[in-house]
Image (spheres, grey):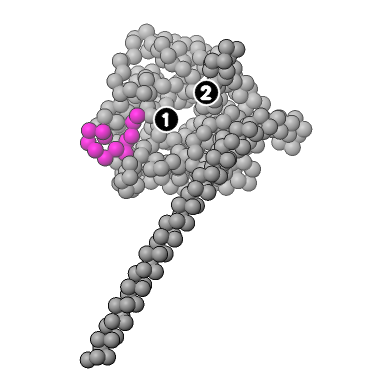
Amino acid sequence: MYIGAHVSSAGGVQNSVGNAVHIGANAFALFLKSQRKWANPPMTPESLQGFKTLSKEHGFDAHKHCLPHGSYLVNLAALEKDKADQAYTGFIDDLHRCESLGITLYNFHPGNTNGEPRPAAIGRIAAQLNKAHAATSSVVTVLENMAGQGNVIGSSWEDLRDIIALVDDKARVGVCIDTCHAFAAGHDLRTPEQFEQTMSAFSRIVGDEYLRAFHLNDSKAPLLSNRDLHANIGTGFLGLRAFHNIMNCDKFQGLPMVLETPIDRKGPDGKTIEDKQVWADEIKLLESLVGMDPESDGFKTLERDLHAKGAAERERIQEQVDRKSAKDGKKGGAAAKAKGKQQTTLNVKRGRKKKEETSDEESE
């Protein structure tokens, strides 16, 4: 199993390699440029060569186990020409960077309909991918599944299937399953039976041949909450057994598995700092699950301790979800009541009109 985390590339992409080594990773993700702005300088020759040299030195196969993440700004489903062109320019720039670094996989969020019809938005994503594939030679564009917020595309396996169906070169497209996103969208992974059902559905609807990577994140929010809230492994609503299921699935061997779990901690001075030891510990935790008996005392103790660690946060988010559900229910009830009142008024008017028509007929 190739497990790592989304590490920093601050100061140049070559620094991501050392950051991955530091946490004991044998796979990693990074941003190839700032994900918060459109205009970025090109990579320097030093960064380019440094990445290749350090990857080779530390045994990273950039073709297989490096999974850059696309910019959050890019929306390949954009309808307006200016926005669509801007999105494509940012997207193709990343693909060119991948090719110059010897990276084969590139992960990105599919896009947002912005209220436009979903089939048309999916068609625009595929058209942008076809254009990008024609302009490059090797990078596999990897669609990430989403949590189901608003107009975001990709929370259902069908969304991913429909995009892939419109891509001309099927060898140039794949899928990265984010476990938190999947759970938030209603794809359960918690028990062996639920895990098998979810992965069988993926196999049937999308196809195992398109699965190219994982983002390993627990979820602070419950099943079908549509909330993208990452939790540390074993502390969220998914729980440790879900990750045991993944780590012991033979067909996932060789795929890059990337942690995006929280590492922010309060320092001695009260300020927030990034504690990368969290990722180092989680990598060891995930590796320890391979071959572990889930019925053993060791596993059950570990599962119980991690579950207890996240109890307060799970309870806090559950309360938020419950309040929103209640609020939405009241809105729905009020809307239904108003609609019923409108219908009653309409029926009364229709009754009066019919009565008047009947009176007219009788008088005639």
**Residue hosting label 2:** 5
Residue most toward the top?
46
Residue 38, magenta (yes or no)? no
Q: Position of residue 280 (x, y in %)?
A: 59, 19
* Viewer-proximal residue among 196 and 190: 190
Please tell me whether mark 2 sits on a helix, a strand or a loop. Answer: strand
Going by the numbered disc 1, the residue's amino acid type is Asn
Magenta span covers which residues?
Answer: 73-84
Q: Position of residue 116 (x, y in %)?
A: 31, 46
Residue 341 falls left or right of residue 353: right
Name the residue located 74 percent from the left edge and 31 percent from the top edge.
301
**Residue hosting label 1:** 107
Name the chief secondary structure element in magenta: loop
Quadrant in which residue 151 is drawn: top left
The circle on residue 231 is none
Decide if residue 137 is in sight here.
no
* Viewer-proximal residue among 317 and 113: 317
Name the N-terminal-most of marks 1 and 2: 2
